[in-house]
Image: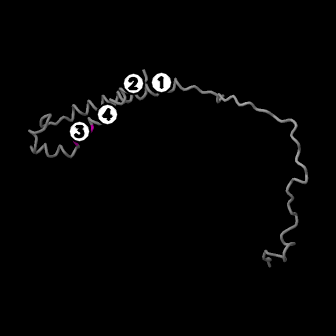
Amino acid sequence: MEQIILAVHLIIALAIIGLIMLQQGKGADMGASFGAGGSQTLFGSDGGGNILTKATAWLVVLFFASSFALALMVNQRSVVEDDLGLDIPVTVNAEAEAPVADELPVLDDTPASATAGGDDLPELD
């Protein structure tokens, strides 16, 4: 069912694009009002704006309806799970030894001013 709605959705989208490309802009009506090329138009001197505009509006309504239907289908298909579905065994080693004091790094606690020649910081007056 989802594939059918998706195919209809794609056909409607392509039809909307085609109808929009067929419509003429608002500036094209200016020449037709003075009689220039009015007899050579496909839909007459009034143009096909009404027919094309209504067809575009109906296709847009169908497009939004199919979008909504697809959104509902995807929402029903998705399931929230707390478990990721991974079966990873967790082992705790109770016999882990504490590190020996000789293996730990030792930091020098002497200030920097006491080593290598005195003060590096300026004094405030």
* Quadrant in the picture for the N terminus: top left
Q: Which mark is residue 14?
A: 4
Inter-mark Cα distance, 1 to 4: 22 Å
Q: Are marks 1 and 2 in contact (CB under 8 Å)?
A: yes
Q: Are marks 4 and 2 in contact (CB under 8 Å)?
A: no
Q: Which residues are magenta?
A: 20-24
The earlier-in-sequence mark between 3 and 4 is 4
The amino acid sitting under disc 4 is Leu
Inter-mark Cα distance, 3 to 1: 34 Å
Query: How packed is label 3: few (under 14 Cα within 10 Å), some, or many (20 or more)?
Result: some
**In percent of the image, x 37 and y 28: which residue is there?**
9
Quick one: 99 or 25, which is closer to the camera? Answer: 99
From the viewer's perspective, is residue 118 above or below residue 17? below
**In this rendering, would 28 be left or right of 13?**
left
The amino acid sitting under disc 3 is Gln
**In this rendering, would 89 be left or right of 100?**
left
Of helix, strand and loop, which one carries label 2? helix
The amino acid sitting under disc 2 is Ile
The residue tagged 3 is 23
**In this rendering, would 66 be left or right of 114?**
left
The residue tagged 2 is 5
Mark closer to the observer (3, 1): 1
The earlier-in-sequence mark between 4 and 2 is 2
